[in-house]
């Protein structure tokens, strides 16, 4: 089986789409075919582990193999294995109760594949954000067209070649190309479309999908806060926040985007952050553990955010333990804390998506919650507190796509939890059963019995029908 790269041509995209739709109409994949597709993907990922690490490392100009394995390969394999173990149960019709007025009829919910699913993935986790939704779509019995980001070209080509070896193009096919190809891709009349990326592009994708009434799942981002309670050990909080922030050099949609710290503990937090970075990354440039920024334009954007904050009077704390030269040529951006930053600056309004962490002081928990709630709903919320009552209070009074308590990011790696945004951070969910459900049509089925009292309600209506109506209505 082979599936050549798709040219940047709308007619070719449509031809591939039509071939998938026709193949699906002839026969949708059953349980055994779905499990076989997932097992083949699992085996290929394990066999190509070294190639995956190398391709991602080259796309970034430097990323630790351990991060690729821990944050991309392992979560994808976990998704696949979780689905395989539970797929038979997921596919089984669900019993549904019927109102007593309809007895002895029965009802059930049947999960059917939607058809041809489109996946537009992002560059920051090119394996995970491509193949985790693919696993969900395959588990649900769909045919799939996948468009990886052009900003990670080596990984996109590796995914294309790997998928071409595993599946026929009428089942799964990978589209490679630039943003114009992505725009044409989003305009295809998919039965469902999943997009991961920025809110700006998400709006364009949703607009294109609306022309075909295509349902969408949008996984966006936003400014995810890390809120530290006044009773939580500040050093432990700093260690965990900075660890989560500096995975992939902050190029993570669920990275903590800013930290809310009690005003009287700001100095302690900054000191702990310095110590944490120094322990994790004693060097930045000469260190394979510290990820590079994906491109020069992204580097310049981050530098612009920091420079604007400095010019507006913010205190800029660059943490560069070995005092190395970090610039756009080596694309190493030093971990940077921002203090006393005016709220109208870009760094406080847009998602940072890099190793820059504004620190916002607060006086009391109500003030911190009000600060979070005054902004668009984030993709993730991180709260640090050992008091269970306060934890429940904060979770109840804030809205976010997901949350981790006393750490960062780890809720995303749980296939038993739905992953998705809310409001500006996205819509819809996937991972685990939620991915299976997103890529399925839940069809309600009513099973009428051989005899039904509702037959008495057929015209011509007489006294029996009127008595029956009074009985079932409760009058």
Image: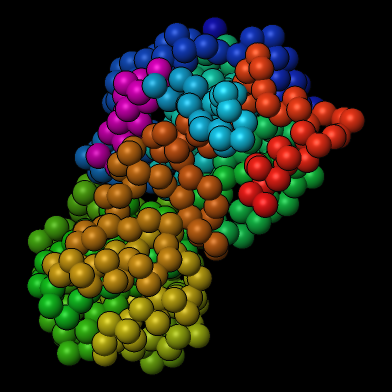
Main SS class of the magenta portion in the image: helix
- Residue 113 visible in the picture: no
Outermost residue on the right side: it is 460
Identify which residue, 225 or 308, lies in the foreground.
225
Looking at the image, residue 90 lies above or below residue 232: above
Residue 81 in the figure: left or right of residue 301: left
Q: Position of residue 271 (x, y in %)?
A: 13, 78
Image point (86%, 34%), residue name = 461
Instruction: Using residue 117 as the reference point, say whether residue 125 is left or right of it.
Output: left
> Residue 14, percent across and down?
76, 26
Rendering colour mode: rainbow
Quadrant of the image occupied by residue 439: top right
Residue 133 rendering spot, x and y as whole percentages: 47, 34
Residue drawn at x 31%, y 71% is 394
Instruction: For the N terminus, give its image quadrant.
Output: top right
Q: Is residue 83 part of the magenta span, yes or no?
A: yes
Q: Is residue 172 above or below residue 8?
A: above
From this viewpoint, which residue is outermost toward the front?
463
Eyeballing the image, is 358 above or below 252? below
Q: Is residue 125 above or below residue 275?
A: above
Q: Which residue is painted at 41% across and 38% down in the image?
A: 431
Q: Position of residue 270 (x, y in %)?
A: 18, 78
Answer whether residue 124 is magenta in the image. no
The stretch of residues the image draws in magenta is: 70-88
Residue placed at 39% from the left, 70% from the top? 398
Give the total number of marks visible in the rendering.
0
């Amino acid at each position: 089986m082979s599936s050549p790269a798709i040219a940047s041509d709308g007619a070719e995209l449509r031809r591939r789409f039509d071939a998938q739709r026709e193949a699906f109409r002839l026969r949708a994949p059953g349980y055994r075919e779905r499990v076989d597709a997932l097992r083949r993907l699992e085996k290929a990922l394990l066999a190509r582990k070294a190639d995956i690490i190398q391709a991602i490392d080259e796309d970034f100009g430097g990323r630790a193999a351990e991060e690729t394995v821990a944050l991309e390969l392992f979560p994808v394999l976990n998704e696949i294995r979780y689905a395989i173990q539970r797929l038979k149960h997921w596919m089984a019709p669900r019993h549904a109760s019927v109102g007593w007025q309809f007895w002895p009829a029965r009802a059930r919910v049947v999960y059917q594949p939607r058809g041809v699913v489109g996946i537009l993935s992002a560059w920051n986790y090119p394996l995970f954000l491509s193949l985790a939704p693919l696993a969900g779509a395959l588990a649900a019995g769909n045919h799939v067209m996948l468009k990886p980001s052009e900003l990670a070209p080596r990984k996109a080509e590796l995914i294309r070649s790997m998928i071409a070896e595993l599946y026929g193009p009428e089942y799964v096919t990978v589209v490679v190309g630039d943003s114009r190809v992505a725009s044409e891709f989003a305009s295809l009349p998919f039965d469902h479309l999943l997009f991961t990326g920025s809110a700006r592009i998400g709006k364009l994708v949703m607009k294109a999908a609306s022309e075909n009434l295509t349902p969408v799942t949008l996984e966006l981002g936003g400014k995810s806060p890390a809120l530290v309670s006044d009773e939580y050990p500040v050093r432990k909080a700093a260690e965990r926040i900075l660890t989560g922030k500096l995975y992939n050099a902050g190029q993570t949609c669920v990275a903590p985007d800013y930290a809310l710290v009690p005003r009287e503990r700001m100095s302690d937090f900054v000191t702990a952050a310095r110590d944490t970075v120094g322990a994790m990354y004693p060097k930045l440039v000469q260190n394979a553990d510290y990820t590079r920024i994906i491109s020069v334009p992204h580097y310049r954007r981050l530098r612009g955010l920091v420079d604007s904050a400095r010019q507006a009077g913010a205190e800029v704390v660059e943490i560069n333990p070995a005092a190395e030269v970090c610039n756009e040529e080596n694309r190493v951006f030093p971990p940077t804390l921002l203090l006393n930053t005016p709220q109208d600056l870009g760094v406080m309004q847009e998602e940072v998506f890099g190793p820059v962490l504004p620190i916002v002081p607060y006086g009391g928990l109500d003030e911190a919650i009000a600060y979070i709630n005054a902004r668009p709903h984030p993709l993730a919320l991180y709260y640090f507190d050992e008091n269970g009552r306060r934890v429940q209070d904060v979770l109840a009074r804030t809205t976010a796509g997901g949350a981790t308590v006393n750490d960062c990011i780890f809720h995303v790696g749980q296939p038993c939890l739905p992953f998705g945004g809310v409001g500006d951070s996205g819509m819809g969910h996937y991972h685990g059963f939620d991915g299976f459900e997103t890529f399925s049509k839940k069809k309600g089925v009513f099973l009428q019995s051989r005899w039904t009292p509702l037959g008495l309600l057929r015209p011509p209506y007489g006294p029996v029908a009127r008595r029956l109506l009074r009985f079932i209505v409760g009058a």
